[in-house]
Amino acid sequence: MHTDGTITRIEYNDGWLTGGKLAKYDVKPGDEILVMPKIDDKTMQYTSDIMEVVYQVAMSAAVELKL
């Protein structure tokens, strides 16, 4: 992320090392390097499923309490 607010996205597949040499990416003073964690698809699905069940239980409880 550059100081002017622009973002340069570098995919892992591009690789940082090319033939033993650093790839050509200009890092300027004030730039921030962000390394995002890799998220497992199964973890996201489990989280989505759990949140759906919690929502359904909460809605059922709200309906029961109003009766």
Image (cartoon, rainbow, N blue to C red):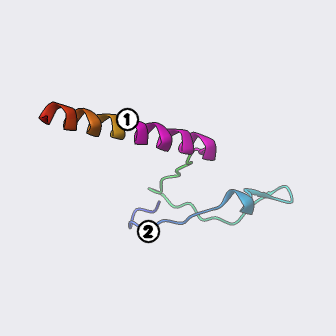
**Element at label 2:** loop
Residue 16 spot, x, y in % from top left: 72, 56
**Residue 53 found in image quarter:** top left
Quadrant location of residue 4? bottom left
Q: Viewer-nearest of labels 2 and 1?
A: 1
Q: In the rendered image of this protein, does residue 3 appear above or below residue 58?
A: below
- Can you give x and y, in whole percent of width and height, for residue 51 in the image? 41, 39
Asked if residue 66 shows in the view, the reply is: yes
Q: Residue 14: x, y in percent?
A: 73, 63
Which of the numbered marks, if any, corresponds to residue 54? 1
Mark 2 sits on what residue?
6
Q: Nearer the viewer, residue 48 or 8?
A: 48
Q: Height in image: 33 above or below 58? A: below
Q: Is residue 40 visible?
A: no
Q: Is residue 33 left or right of residue 53?
A: right
The answer to whether residue 10 is left or right of residue 56 is: right
Closest to the observer, 64 or 20: 64
Q: Residues within 10 Å of mark 2 (few under 14, many from 20)?
A: few
For the residues labelled 2 and 1, the Cα–Cα distance comes to: 39 Å
x 55%, y 44%: residue: 45
Quarter of the rendering occupied by the C terminus: top left
At which x and y percent is residue 62?
20, 36
Q: Which tag, 2 or 1, sits closer to the chain's start?
A: 2
- What's the residue at 60%, 65% (across, down)? 26
Dominant SS in magenta: helix
Residue range corresponding to the magenta coloring: 37-54
Residue occupying image coordinates x 62% and y 42%: 42
Pointers 2 and 1 in contact (C-beta within 8 Å): no
What residue type is disc 1 on? Val
Please state which amino acid type lies under the numbered disc 2.
Answer: Thr
